[in-house]
Each structure stands twice: as C-alpha cells, then as structure tokens.
Amino acid sequence: MERQVRSGIMTPVRGLMTREERLNPFPFFRHMRETSPVRYDHDRDSWDVFRYEDVYRVLSDHETFSSNRDALHPGKAESASLIDMDPPQHTKYRNIVSRAFTPKRVADLAPRIEQITAELLDKIAGKGEAQLIKDVAGPLPVIVIAEILGIPAKDRHLFKEWSDKLVESAAVQNTEADQALMMEKNRVSQELYAYFTEQLAARRANPGDDLLSVLLAAEVEGERLNEQQLLSFCLLLLVAGNETTTNLITNAIRAFAEQPELQTRLRENPGLMPGAVEEALRYYSPVASIPSRFATKEAELGGQLIKKGDQVVAWVGSANRDEAKFPHPDQFIVDRKPNNHLAFGWGPHFCLGAPLARLEGQIALQAILKRLANIRLQAGSELQPVTSTVVFAVQELPIAFET
Ligand code: HEM
C-alpha cells in the first residue's frame, strides 16, 4: 500500500522538499514564523499562515475565511459535505450528525476498542518486531469505524481499500496533472456510494443500533438528512477519521521511540496518558495544514492584505510549535498545562471525531506500552515521510521491542 498523497494542492512547498525537511519540518516552520508568518506562495497560488494567533483567527472567523470554495460563486450547487459548508447551513447539518457522536456513544465503545487493540497486539507481541502501521495503527480505526457504522466484518477489507484511496486523493484539484487521480477518486466514491446506498436501504427496512440507523432517524427541528447528505457524511467519516487516527498513534510511538524516557514515565504513571495524547497531538500534529479556507472579502492578516477569493492554508503543525503560545515548544512535555493545541482545528469545524480519536489514542498507546517493552526503531531502518503537505506522517514505523 502506498501511503502517499499526490495532488495539485500538494505542489511542493519550498522548505518542505527533502526527506529530512518532511520528517522534521519544525525548523522551517520556526523560520517562517520569524521571517514571513503570513506569506503568499506563487507556486501554489495560496497564502500560508504559520503563527498560532493567525491560524486561530483563520479557523475561527468563518465569515471572512469560508470553508466553501464556491462561496464566491452564488448559483453553484450547495455542497453536501459538512466540511465544505459555512454557517448557518453548517450549524444545522452538524447538529443532526452530532446526535450520532454523543459523548456517551463514544465512551460506550471503550471495551470494544480495548478488545480490538488486544487482538492486534496478540499477533505481534511474541515476534520482537512489527510494522506499526500495517499491524496495529492502520487497522484499528478502520475496524472501529466499520463497527460503528454497522458494516459486516466480511466487507472490512473493502472498507480499508476505499478509505486509503479516498485519503490519497482527498485534496486533489481539477488540474490536468491530477486527472488520473480525480478519475480514481470518482470511481472509488461511486463504489462507496453504491455500497452505502445498499446499507442504508437495509437499515431503513430493518433499523438497528448502529450509526447509520441513528443518522437515518436523527432530525433537528423536523429536518432530516437527505440521501445525498447521508452518503457524503459516511464518506467524510472515512476520509477524516481513519488515516488521522492511524497517524496520531504512529506519531506518538515515533516520539516515544525517539525519547525512551517518555515510555518509562508513562509506564510508571498510566494516569498521565490523556495528557500525553494531547501533547502528541501538539508535538507531532497528524494534520500539518488545513488547506481549504477562502477569503470572502479583503482582510488584513499578520500585516498582509488578503484579497477576496484568495486561498489560505492554515499551518496547524506550525501553530502548535509557536513559542509565543507554548513555552519550550520543541519539548515533549507529558503533563503540559495548558495545552490549547489546534490539532483538531478550531471554530465551527472543530473535529467532530475528536472524542473518538482521543479515546482510541489513549487506549491504543496504553496497551502498546503495557505489552511491548523498550520500543525502538528497528536497527538499520530509515523512516520515509509521506509526500503530502496536509498530513504529517511516516509511511511506516518499523519497531523492535521486548515482551
Ligand atoms: C474535522 C483533525 C479524527 C471526523 C477535522 C478538522 C481537523 C481534524 C483539523 C478540521 C478541518 C477543517 O477545519 O476544515 C483530526 C485529527 C484526528 C481526527 C488530528 C485524529 C487524531 C477524526 C475521527 C473522525 C473525524 C476519528 C470520525 C470518526 C471529522 C469530521 C470533521 C472533522 C466529520 C468535519 C467537521 C465539520 O466540518 O464540522 N478533523 N480528526 N475526525 N473530523 Fe477529524
């Protein structure tokens, strides 16, 4: 499986070209915060925003920085996907889907997440080494979301394939270079739509306790989601939830392998784990940049004048290392307080799956540290970063350990 994102929006960012720069973008981020915190990149035809304060503003001020590429073209069809909508349409839709993601529903999943993690770890524990993504961090969120949606176990492999392909092509733009990817994305979306259409019909006839049935029944002020909205929400869950959670777990273990004293501290004090997950989200943010905000009007940001219609990329991976916000930003401080990182975004689009991602991260990391001792990178292995500039991740994490 190639865990690479290739697309127009991935036109390389100067400063993030080499393997070393992608594995460790933080010196580049620091340099940008210091020298050009808000800058226009002609190669990519977009603004880059690097400081915490400015990233926060872009994510909070939806009236100026819209999530809808077409907001400036009235008459275009309204987006059916939550992530591209602006309030008030976004608020209404989000209220409906939030019904399905209540804290109680998420908390109830804990025993099942523990069981799935234990089964995955059983397969590697005796071996002394593993490919963390292939063996544990990749399958876990896919199995969890498939179960939440009520997808039969026999279809899970389809699910994983679709989800990988969608993530690979999530941010493509309709440029010539991206034609092949666009076609692949359309094909996968159609397969998924067809699959979910069948599943939804089955739930209509015979509702259960799964998320699809809950979404079908959920209504706010007498309104329900239409078929198109339901389908695009299912797709969004796969795109937004799987690879991000995989990368949270993997990035955290990478940090623990690089700084073994963190493992010792966390094994001795398991109660520190929730804070350690927050710090992992800040320190190695799985989402490096949120690329899709569009200025609805002229705006001043960090001393620069953003023009109406311009695209703005919010670098949360840089904001989360901003020394103006976080003391000793390049240190992994397990019990850092306060820790108001922006790894899940901010404002109206704040990650809907954050409670689930946190729970999966805490359970998986706790179990990994308990079962595997002295986790380190396999001797002679070389980490390869993914090529996407939206995601901060490695393609695989080969680890060695004792049990
Ligand atoms: C939105 C990050 C896990 C579902 C977002 C956004 C970020 C993010 C940065 C904001 C995007 C924007 O402002 O345009 C993450 C990270 C995760 C994670 C770092 C794991 C560590 C999940 C999971 C799910 C999920 C597990 C669901 C199962 C969503 C949805 C949205 C979203 C539906 C759109 C919310 C909206 O537009 O109102 N996520 N996410 N995410 N995320 Fe997550």
Image: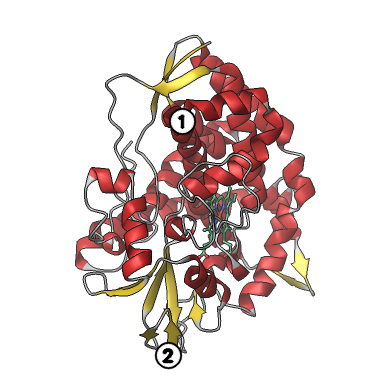
Q: Secondary structure at mark 2?
A: loop
Dot 2 and dot 1 residues touching (CB under 8 Å): no
Q: Which mark is residue 298?
A: 2
Q: Give 35 or 86, whichever is nearer the viewer.
A: 35
Query: Which sits earlier in the primary sequence, circle 2 or circle 1?
Result: 1
Q: Give 359 or 51, whichever is nearer the viewer.
A: 51
Q: Of the residues shown, which amino acid type is indicated by label 1? A: Gln
Q: Which mark is residue 3?
A: none
Does the closest atom of ligand 1 sit within 8 Å of the Cβ of label 2?
no
Q: Residue furthest front?
A: 327
Q: Is residue 138 visible?
A: no
Task: State the image quarter where residue 178 is shown.
Answer: bottom left
Residue 367: horizontal and vertical position, in percent?
62, 25
Q: How many marks?
A: 2
Residue 363: horizontal and vertical position, in percent?
64, 32
Q: Is residue 242 left or right of residue 276?
A: left
Q: Which mark is residue 259?
A: 1
**Residue at 55%, 34% in the rendered image:** 140
Q: Is residue 196 visible?
A: yes
The relative height of residue 109 versus residue 403 in the rendered view (above or below) is below
How packed is label 2: few (under 14 Cα within 10 Å), some, or many (20 or more)?
few
Q: Of the residues shown, which amino acid type is indicated by label 2? A: Glu
